[in-house]
Image (cartoon, helix red, strand yellow):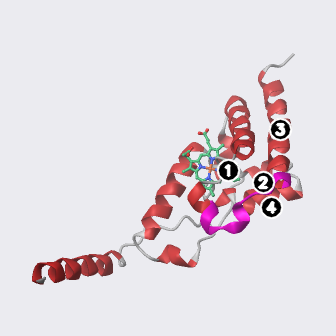
Amino acid sequence: MKLFKRILFFLLLVLIVIQFFPPTPNKSDTTPPTDLLLVENVPEKVNATLTNVCYDCHSNHTNYPWYAGIEPLSYWLAGHIEEGKEHLDFSQWDLYSAKKKAHKLEEIAESVTEGWMPLESYKWIHKSANLSEEESKAVADWASMLRLNYLKAEKPQ
Ligand code: HEC
């Protein structure tokens, strides 16, 4: 019993200490000129979905929930954001080549149609991130149309 109490005390101590070492927040004051929403013509509905949902993990602008201030939950969120941006960073969009943009747009359309984005854990917590069929279709249609432009740009006639 004594050992159990000691372990519990130790874990509590660790939990308190890590509160002083939060990860750097993914919250930039400025929007770079390479941001997708500045360089592409995005319909209002799609804009809302991207801004409210996808930008949380795929840009420099995360809208943090209250519990994001609690370690180690914050580490877990930071991990998703880091990995999400590695794969697709809307803040750096215009730095991508036409070929890369076309590929990412294909993946974006697929991700919402097949439902593997946003992440499952994110959907549990953010009810509004469970995209309606209409919202998913709007994103998929927009991405597929824009993709065609980039495919054309790649193969000049
Ligand atoms: C909670 C964080 C989170 C949210 C919100 C989120 N994503 Fe992701 N996304 C990730 C992570 C992490 C990865 C990389 C791992 C994976 O593919 O599962 C990823 C990967 C992707 C990829 C694959 C890119 C590639 O080329 O490999 C696409 C496309 C994508 N996300 C689109 C979206 C779209 C569209 C939305 C909004 C509807 C969205 N994501 C919302 C975290 C997120």
Residue drawn at 73 percent across, 33 percent down: 102
- Magenta range: 123-134
- Mark pair 4, 3: CA separation: 17 Å
Q: Residues within 10 Å of mark 4 (few under 14, many from 20)?
A: few
Q: Residues within 10 Å of mark 2 (few under 14, many from 20)?
A: some
Looking at the rendered structure, the secondary structure element under dot 3 is helix
Rendered location of residue 135, percent (x, y) = 82, 54
Residue drawn at 57 percent across, 43 percent down: 87
- Mark pair 1, 3: CA separation: 15 Å
Rendered location of residue 62, percent (x, y) = 61, 65
Circle 4 is placed at which residue position?
Answer: 48
* Magenta segment, prevailing SS (helix, strand or loop): helix
Residue type at mark 1 is Phe
> Which of 135/100 is in front?
135
- Mark pair 4, 1: CA separation: 14 Å
Q: Residue 101's quadrant in the figure?
A: top right
Residue drawn at 65 percent across, 54 percent down: 118
- Which residue is situated farthest in the front direction here? 1
The circle on residue 154 is: none
Q: Specify whether tag 1 is near ligand 1 (CB below 8 Å).
A: no
138 displayed left or right of 36: right
Q: Is 97 one of the magenta-colored residues? A: no
Confirm or deny contact between disc 4 and disc 1 (CB under 8 A).
no
Front: mark 2 or 3: 3
Confirm or deny contact between disc 1 and disc 2 (CB under 8 A).
yes
Circle 1 is placed at which residue position?
Answer: 90
Front: mark 4 or 2: 4
Where's the C terminus, which quadrant?
top right
Sequence order check: which comes first, mark 2 or mark 3? 2
Residue type at mark 2 is Leu
